[in-house]
Image: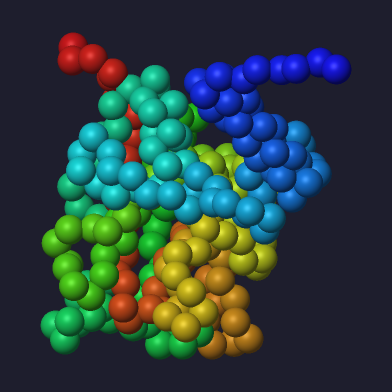
Amino acid sequence: MVTINIKGKDLYLISAVFILLIGSGIVVAYNPNYQTTPGNPAIMGHTIDEINTVDDDGNVVSLEQYITNLVNSVNGALVCETTPIYDYSANGNGGWRVMPAYNYNEGIVSIPATCKSDAGCVIKVEIYNSGSSTRPIVVRRYDYIQYATNKWWSSHRTAGDAVNGDSVSTDIMPRYGSDTKGYLYLRDDYVYRTTTVETDSSKWTFIDRTGTWGMKAYICSYGDSEPA
């Protein structure tokens, strides 16, 4: 007969190892494809675009956007226009103006020349709620460049095969909001029957249907990372 003596401190260590092994087994069993699709939110947990953090300017951004901004910062400091290219202002009743359904003419803007240059531009979008029209609750940034062929690329839609002006509505940035409150987003074209038709290759259409949230957008570019 073999006798094994286990001291108290050793028992804690062995227990910890067993818990670790069991936990790892649960993760693998719960998501057998964890090596190729880690953190699949449909399976378990949250993706980095669902977790918010505060950036160096005090803005609340998603963890994904925060990391993107850090990576982008190697291109230099972000310099933005002081006047927004899009601003659907508060309605004075504690909320934001609501665009008429499927009639988004007020959201049509001309694309700045810098967004068609070789360097492209950055679209900085500030999201507000009805409680404040002075401090955004979320700040999102998306790189954008439109080529001479009117094909464009954004850091949201990276395929590079979308064409501005081809009558196909394509999202330049992802939607913000839900079905119950409407959406905030930006498209290259917008077509709905014959009510609103924006298929100009030199224009975008901002869409704002929430009434609860508001949106301002600024055009930015990368400046020098260090003062001259």
Q: Residue at x 20, y 43 (%)?
A: 58
Q: Residue 181, how many percent across, how many down? A: 42, 80
Task: Pinpoint residue 98: horizontal percent, then vertical percent.
Answer: 33, 83
- Which residue lies at the image location 54% right of the left edge and 87% below the top edge? 195
Front-lying residue, 86 or 18: 18
x 32%, y 55%: residue: 138
Residue 136, percent from left and from top: 24, 58
Task: Check the image and name the residue furthest to the top.
Answer: 228
Q: Nearer the viewer, residue 2 or 183?
A: 2
Report whether 165 appears left or right of 78. right
Left/right placement of residue 37 relative to residue 184 reads right
Q: Quadrant of residue 66?
A: top left
Quadrant of the rendered image containing residue 206: bottom left
In the image, residue 174 above or below residue 116: below
Quadrant showing the N terminus? top right
Q: What residue sits 39% from the left and 34% below the top?
A: 69
Let me know if residue 13 appears in the view. Answer: no
Indicate the quadrant containing the C terminus: top left, top right, bottom left or bottom right. Answer: top left
Residue 124 coordinates in the image, percent (x, y): 34, 48
Asked if residue 118 shows in the view, the reply is: yes
| Residue 219, placed above or below residue 126 | above
**Residue furthest front as drawn:** 1
Q: Is residue 94 above or below residue 13?
A: below
Left or right: residue 21 versus residue 58 is right
Taking depth in this image into account, of 118 and 213 the one nearest to the observer is 213
